[in-house]
Image (spheres, coloured by chain):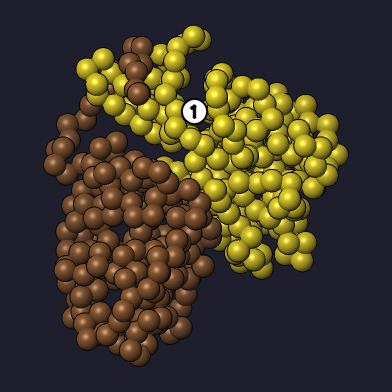
Chain colours: A brown, B yellow
């Protein structure tokens, strides 16, 4: 399908193909992308909630949430706009811990956020040490532009799934497309399969 | 400007992915906003050349009339405007962020929409203003165009100077009661300051749509 672009050679920055998915380039800054203004929710009003198809909803205030056991992880992140950032350092609470003990028939979740953003993921993708609610980046409190006070961190999927300003998860039996998933982007978003847009 | 046989059409504000392929199969791809209206015969991309870039220097320096270009799109369903969405429209452009807003303005003109619109365009210098001639030729009484130069200006420049701050927004951005529909596109620092300013002035965050580019921190 592709054809040669006359006179194009490329700069070809050296990249490790085992770490940089197809169609991505390595970015050293940390670009900011979002569809609206940055919310600034006071921590006193912040909570994180698990609700929907659960035996009982659970909710944590900011002090309760940050008192939970946290993990520090170094992961590579991949944005659908083509940049990949290697070795990013985060601290947050594992979804394994947050979901522990929950009885549910749900197979999907919708992450909901300040500002109204939503994104959907299979519940299974949040388990087994693959997902966190992160509130520190690079040793500092997570900056609002990057999703602070807290954002979802699911680095094995394109980064729009790592919802900024996350306030909770709604567990659902059926898959419900979120904000970008309703606006032309892929429902699952595996960067290694280049699932960028609907139909990929 | 590109001629695309079989182009399915786009909505004003959408973008495309451009993919370049070298002779040995090496590929690089980036996203660019469409600056043309759906009604225009040719597709128009606006590309800012980034010295350290891999795709934009090729598009600006190398690509010539007659070359073929691989595109994918149109992409994006949120940063778009159609007459049915109404207004009044407030368009805030930083640098090459003018591109999708230009598509919106061209679409508005092509459809004869009477939705009142204001464009506030921030550029480092007069030389870097894209579509300068077209902007100066604006004769539409329902479109107000405001330019601010942030780094340098001609000696006889009597327009705005400096970055978009709350005072400028208070003058230009309609009032919160008029409930403008806002599209802000540009480098993240520009968009963040403009969107934050509008929220501070009392505008509804749900009516502010943003598109940001460029690395930061």
Q: Quadrant of residue A91?
A: bottom left
Q: Which residue is at 48% across, 35% downward?
A: B73
Residue at (28%, 39%) from the top-left corner?
Answer: A24
Counting from the top left corner in percent of width and height, residue A27 is at 28, 42
Q: Name the secondary structure under disc 1.
A: loop
- Asked if B155 appears above or below A61 in the picture, the reply is above
Q: Is residue B181 left or right of residue A138?
A: right
Q: Where, by quadrant of the figure, is residue B96 drawn?
A: top right
Q: Tell me: residue A150, above or below residue B66.
A: below
Viewer-side residue, B127 vs A47: A47
Say whether residue A157 is visible: yes
Left or right: B203 as drawn, with respect to B61: right
Image point (26%, 15%), residue name? B23
The picture places residue B125, in percent across and down from the top left corner, at 58, 31
Q: Is residue B152 visible?
A: no
Left or right, A97 with reference to A141: left
Task: Indicate the position of residue B212 as horizontal and vertical percent values.
Answer: 48, 47
Q: Is residue B110 above or below residue A56?
A: above
The C terminus of chain A, quarter of image: top left
Image quadrant assignment for residue B93: top right
| Residue at image mark 1 | B47
Left or right side of B86 for A119:
left
Which residue does the image show at 35% across and 59% down from the upper left? A161
Other residues around mark 1 within 10 Å, as few (<14) / some (14–19) / many (≥20): some
Give B158 or B99, whichever is nearer the viewer. Answer: B99
On-image quarter of the N terminus of chain A:
top left
Q: Nearer the viewer, residue A53 or B25?
A: A53
Q: Is residue A92 above or below residue B134?
A: below
Label 1 lies in what chain?
B
Percent across and percent down for residue B14 are 55, 40
Outermost residue, right direction?
B141
């Amino acid at each position: 399908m592709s054809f040669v672009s006359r006179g194009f050679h490329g700069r070809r920055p050296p990249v490790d193909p085992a770490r940089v998915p197809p169609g991505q380039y390595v970015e050293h800054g940390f670009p900011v992308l979002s569809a609206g203004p940055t919310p600034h929710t006071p921590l006193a009003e912040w909570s994180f909630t698990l609700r929907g198809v659960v035996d009982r909803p659970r909710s944590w205030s900011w002090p309760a949430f940050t008192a939970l056991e946290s993990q520090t992880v170094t992961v590579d992140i991949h944005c659908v706009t083509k940049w990949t950032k290697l070795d990013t350092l985060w601290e947050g609470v594992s979804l394994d811990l947050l979901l522990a003990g929950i009885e549910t028939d749900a197979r999907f979740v919708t992450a909901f956020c300040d500002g109204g953003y939503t994104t959907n993921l299979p519940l299974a993708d949040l388990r087994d040490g693959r997902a966190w609610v992160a509130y520190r980046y690079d040793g500092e409190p997570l900056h609002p532009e990057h999703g602070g006070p807290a954002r979802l961190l699911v680095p094995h999927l394109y980064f729009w799934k790592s919802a900024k300003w996350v306030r909770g998860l709604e567990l659902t039996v059926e898959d419900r497309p979120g904000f970008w998933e309703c606006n032309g982007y892929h429902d699952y978003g595996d960067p290694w399969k280049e699932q960028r847009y609907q139909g990929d | 400007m590109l001629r695309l046989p079989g182009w399915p059409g786009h909505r004003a504000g959408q973008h495309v992915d451009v993919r370049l392929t070298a002779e040995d199969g090496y590929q690089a791809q980036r996203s660019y906003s469409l600056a043309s209206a759906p009604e225009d015969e040719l597709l128009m991309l606006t590309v800012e050349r980034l010295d350290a870039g891999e795709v934009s220097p090729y598009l600006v320096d190398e690509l010539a009339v007659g070359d073929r270009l691989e595109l994918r799109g149109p992409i994006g369903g949120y940063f778009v405007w159609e007459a049915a969405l109404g207004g009044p429209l407030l368009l805030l452009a930083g640098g090459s962020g003018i591109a999708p807003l230009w598509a919106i303005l061209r679409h508005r003109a092509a459809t004869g929409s009477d939705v009142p619109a204001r464009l506030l365009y921030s550029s480092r210098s007069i030389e870097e203003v894209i579509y300068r001639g077209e902007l100066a030729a604006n004769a539409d009484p329902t479109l107000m165009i405001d330019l601010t130069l942030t780094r340098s200006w001609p000696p006889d420049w009597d327009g705005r100077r400096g970055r978009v701050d709350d005072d400028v927004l208070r003058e230009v951005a309609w009032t919160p009661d008029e409930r403008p529909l806002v599209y802000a596109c540009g480098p993240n620092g520009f968009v963040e300051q403009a969107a934050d300013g509008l929220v501070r002035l009392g505008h509804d965050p749900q009516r502010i749509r943003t598109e940001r580019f460029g690395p930061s921190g």
